[in-house]
Image (cartoon, rainbow, N blue to C red):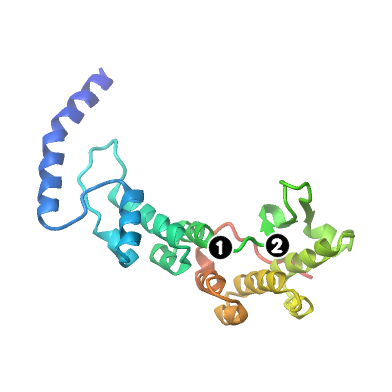
Amino acid sequence: MESFIFTIFFILTIPFVLLGNGALWILGYEVTNDAQKIAALIVENQEDPQECFDIRFFSNVFGPTVASVQNTCVYEYASLTQDPSACELLMPGEYGFSCIGAAETRERTCTIAFNRIVEWGSYLNGTHQRATIDECRNGNITSAIGKKCCIVSKIANLRDFNDCSSLSGEKNIYEDCLTELALKLGNPVICDSIEEPGKTACILRAKYKAALSTLPPPLAR
């Protein structure tokens, strides 16, 4: 019985959805729920990602919301252009942080994962390794790259460990370190030494740190 009622309701709403979408089209809005298509058009026409918020449509209860399609459009734009600055349109919010990740072009040498784990190397060539913060604290890592990534891990996870200078001779790892330090301290100024577009990504992460609920608090050194 319930499925029958839902079916009737769905059928009855179709004319109203069509009329509403027609009116929005006349008013000049982008009437679609295809976020990827609109994002690609915005990129092709070299328009501002703010155009994503011109998407409007009437939908029944089974369809996506306007806000979700608008936000996905911004995400897709940032991914296509590799421009993390667009992701500020999604801040504050964790989807904005996901957007930054999609827009980044440089693969990190040292990646801070969940549960205070740092990873380095590649699965593809069999060099992938990882270490917990306790392993890094205790000096249990023997590989040269692992030791450097452990410094990045301690920067990210320990309260009074805030010096990246020992890594300044290796650009990629140094920028990984500065990115983690800026995020931990919530200080965008630390990002100034990072090259674009990584600098913008770093600044946004630090600026909107409070919106990242999955970020664990730093530990005592």
**Which residue is tagged 1?**
105
Residue 128 location in percent, x, y? 76, 50
Q: Position of residue 50 (x, y in %)?
A: 31, 65
- Determine the CA span between mark 1 and mark 2: 13 Å
Q: Residues within 10 Å of mark 2 (few under 14, many from 20)?
A: some
The amino acid pointed to by label 1 is Thr
Residue 155 horizontal side relative to residue 3, left or right: right
What quarter of the picture does the N terminus occupy? Answer: top left
Q: Do labels 1 and 2 touch, CB within 8 Å?
A: no
Residue on which disc 2 sits: 109
Closer-to-camera residue (35/89): 35
Residue 189 makes an appearance in the image = yes
Q: Is residue 163 visible?
A: no
Q: What residue type is labelled 2?
A: Thr
Seen at 67% across and 55% down, the residue is 113
The answer to which image quadrant residue 86 occupies is bottom left
